[in-house]
Amino acid sequence: MDRIYAWYECEVLDRPPVRFHRHNSEFETIDQNAGRWPSLRDRWFDADYQVESFEASIRGVEFLGETFPVYWPNLGPDVFASFFGMELEYGETTSWATHSLSDLESIDSLAIDWESPYLKGIDALTDAALARCRNQFLVGYTDLHPGVDCAAALRGSSSLCIDLYDQPERVEALMEVAVREFRPIYDHFHAKLKAYRQPSVSWMQIPSYGTMHIPSADFSSLISTAQFERFCIPVHEQEIRSIDHNIFHVDGPGVARHLDLLLELDGIHAFQWVQGVGDDYPIMQWAETIRKIRGRNRPIIVDLSADDLNEFMETFSPEGVFLWVDVADTESQRAVLDRVTRWVSRA
């Protein structure tokens, strides 16, 4: 935790923080027990099974570096939008929104349904994990996407793109509702964690002793920078207010188009750079994006392979860098930690 807090200040203790993980790798495993439930949805909502499966996955595992055992309750990336009464459809490793908002005339009546089966489902997953964690693992809060990603889930990306031109004022109203309801939901789950003396942590698995949040705007890869400034920046300003540690999830080059605007928001304390897949690898082709973030004295998370590590360390200084390295076995992980420690001494 001391290394992480130093990273937020763009400082280094003995070495930068290192998490042994590859972004989104948790969504590549197929559950072989799917036939036990009438539907995939039932499996997702089976709180005891989900927590027991997590416990089995960490049993006997040695967690090195800043790799924390964190159970975060998950019903899919659009679950925040489902709290407004929208249904989700379930696949093996993710879920999809059904886009329940057929028009923008009923926005004023939108509100969180505290009896939503999805909200109750996240409650059940969270409560089951908190009851079982017993200092063995951390429990996080679910993935919350207010603002434009919530609007896109409720309305559908194609419809929202058209709305931005045809009904911009109503889109602003929808965005305002989405962010207005964020903090009551966040505080609801934060209180659950604090009642069990848990830190604030979510899917990114970077704990905070105070409050931690992961703002994002994946939909913004579809819109112009002028639209982002009008429709998204005011929402982000509200979303990040009074949060101790906000780490913005920059999901690929499309979102990175808006980086200059995001760097103007003082309440964003760090950035996660997700370069994408396929031709978006390796990491070094995005050196200028990394330099832009570090040039504004903002810390950054980078996701790279062990093969990229030496070139990365030769190019960048260790201050303000949190490395996510795709290495599985403990012997190789120890070797990476040794290399990263020597990076500091060379710097």
Image (spheres, rainbow, N blue to C red):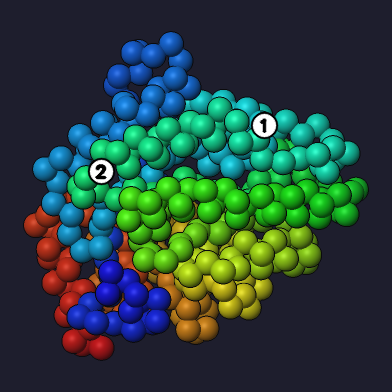
Q: Is residue 59 left or right of residue 226?
A: left
Q: Quadrant of the N terminus?
A: bottom left
Q: Position of residue 24 (x, y in %)?
A: 40, 46
x 47%, y 68%: residue: 245
Q: Position of residue 164 (x, y in %)?
A: 83, 51
Local secondary structure at mark 2: loop
Label 1, label 2: how far apart the Cα atoms are: 31 Å
Lower sequence index among marks 1 and 2: 1
Residue corresponding to mark 2: 133
x 60%, y 31%: residue: 115
Assess whether mark 2 and mark 1 are in contact (beta carbons under 8 angstroms). no
Question: Label 1 sits on what residue type?
Answer: Gly
x 39%, y 14%: residue: 37
Checking the image for residue 85, the label placed there is: 1
x 38%, y 44%: residue: 72
Q: Quadrant of the C terminus?
A: bottom left
Q: Is residue 90 left or right of residue 6?
A: right
Local secondary structure at mark 1: loop
For residue 338, say whether it is visible. Answer: yes
Q: Is residue 226 above or below residue 102?
A: below
Q: Nearer the viewer, residue 277 or 139?
A: 139
Q: Position of residue 92 (x, y in %)?
A: 43, 27
Q: Nearer the viewer, residue 275 or 12?
A: 12
- Residue 12 found in image quarter: bottom left
